Image (spheres, rainbow, N blue to C red):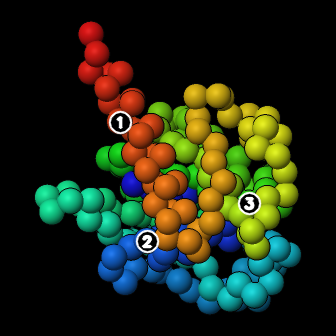
Amino acid sequence: MVIAGGFGVGKTTTVGAISEIRPLTTEAAITEVAAGVDDLTHTPGKTTTTVAMDFGVITLDPTLKLYLFGTPGQDRFGFMWDDLVEGALGGLVIVDTRRLDDCYAAVDYFEHKDVPFVVAVNAFDGAVEHDLDEVRWALDIGEHVPLIVFDARNTGSVRDALLAVLEVALSRAEAAAAP
């Protein structure tokens, strides 16, 4: 499963909140050059960024493991996305409503790749800046795409978001198998 979204939306935090192994991360320090490119307005304490991927694991039952791949959020690392999405069951697109402009690319990517996905609004500090109907309209996502609120720091909340993705993927697979 792929965890995607723009810069600083909570992808690494999401993987870390639920992975049963210590997540593999490819964090690098944000340099002065990158700070000039990446908008740190809403994430002033952010000192590192994912440059390749995050990786975590969840055991669903003794015979089934779910592998989590977190994408980098900046356009300049976008070349990684195709490799991370290849063979993916589905995607969780994380959205920060304070910076909706940063979220269009991830939504468009999953739509064009025809990968089932859920859009999850990360409730930073327990708050969501906009009503979900407004977010759906702003991101131009159809009613068939689930739109939920979650907290990337909370294991139960992340679990529920990933279950939503599994439900969408299962529905898609069942529809494809039907005559």
Q: Is residue 116 above or below residue 179?
A: below
Type of the residue with mark 2:
Ile
Disc sitting over residue 18 in the figure:
2
Residue located beneath label 1 in the image: 170
Residue located beneath label 3 in the image: 96
Query: Tag 1, which secondary structure?
Result: helix
Residue 64 as seen in the image, left or right of residue 49: left
**Around disc 3, counting alpha carbons within 10 Å, would you say few (fewer than 14), some (14 to 19), or many (20 or more)?**
many
Q: Is residue 96 above or below residue 173?
A: below
Q: CA distance from mark 1 to mark 2?
A: 21 Å
Query: Tag 3, which secondary structure?
Result: loop
Q: Depth check: 3 or 32 in front?
A: 3
Q: CA distance from mark 3 to mark 1?
A: 27 Å
x and y percent of residue 76 in the render?
62, 65
Q: Nearer the viewer, mark 3 or mark 1?
A: 1
Q: Nearer the viewer, mark 3 or mark 2?
A: 2
Q: Residue furthest left?
A: 63
Q: CA distance from mark 3 to mark 2?
A: 20 Å
x and y percent of residue 165 in the render?
46, 46
